[in-house]
Amino acid sequence: MTARPHALAVGTSGMLAGACRGLAERGWQVTMVARARRKLDAAIAGTPHLWPAPVDYRDATAFDTAVKDAIARAGPVRLALCWIRGTAPDALTATAAVVVDGGRVVHVLGSAGGRHPSTLGSGALLAQDRVRYQRVVLGFVVESGRSRWLTDAEISAGALAAIDDSALDPHVVGQVEPWHARP
Ligand SMILES: NC(=O)c1ccc[n+]([C@@H]2O[C@H](COP(=O)([O-])OP(=O)(O)OC[C@H]3O[C@@H](n4cnc5c(N)ncnc54)[C@H](OP(=O)(O)O)[C@@H]3O)[C@@H](O)[C@H]2O)c1
């Protein structure tokens, strides 16, 4: 068991690997969930306090076992960082369920076709107050008259901004309006 608080970071070996490194720098012990072991190993290389949990979050039984193993070695989950496809809502529910009372769920979301950020996310998590639920909505950037999608570094920095300030919700990274200005 580690003395550090435990963060469970689901779907984070890609664009959110930088956010996991930022969590480790902030004093967290981070369990990173993704399927491909090689990508996980590359993401954790050189950074202490990141542990890989190679599992498919669509496999409820395997995911439950992996999360229980992570809790056994790193302690109760105080923060969940989630980038979970909308096609796997049960994985978001299962992740939020293991977060301790008073803990936090930071949910990274795509911008969903120009819908207002306040309408995005999990209705069930928005309706409860057992844990603090924050949404991080990924937008785009307009610079020098041209628009582009966010970089992985900008996405990770946006997630960390929400982690650093629990009052932020929804936290839009870049912009989502006007939607027609997207790349
Ligand atoms: N508005 C924006 O600017 C915006 C929004 C969204 C995405 N993007 C861009 O689009 C790129 C691609 O997006 P992406 O979704 O492919 O992001 P990604 O973060 O590169 O990949 C998804 C992450 O989730 C994991 N994952 C996926 N399915 C999983 C499953 N069933 N079980 C466990 N883990 C799973 C992946 O690892 P495994 O595949 O190994 O499981 C990976 O760690 C990003 O790099 C980003 O730059 C931009």
Image: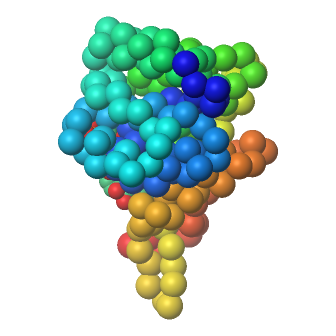
Picture layout, residue 183 above or below residue 22: below
Dividing the picture into quadrants, the one containing residue 3 is top right
Q: Position of residue 85 (x, y in %)?
A: 37, 36
**Is residue 30 something that shows in the picture?**
yes
Image point 75% across, 22% down: which residue?
102
Dividing the picture into quadrants, the one containing residue 40 is top left
Q: Which quadrant, please, contains the N terminus?
A: top right
Image point 75% across, 42% down: which residue?
166
Query: In this view of the protein, which residue sits in the foreground, 137 or 77?
Result: 77
Q: Specify how the rendered protein is coloured.
A: rainbow
Dividing the picture into quadrants, the one containing residue 44 is top left
Q: Position of residue 96 (x, y in %)?
A: 56, 21
Image point 37% across, 17% down: which residue?
66
Number of numbered discs overlaid on the protein picture = 0
**Is residue 111 something that shows in the picture?**
no
- In the drawing, does residue 95 fall left or right of residue 164? left
Picture layout, residue 60 above or below residue 52: above
Q: Position of residue 171 (x, y in %)?
A: 65, 52
Q: Which quadrant, please, contains the C terminus?
A: bottom left
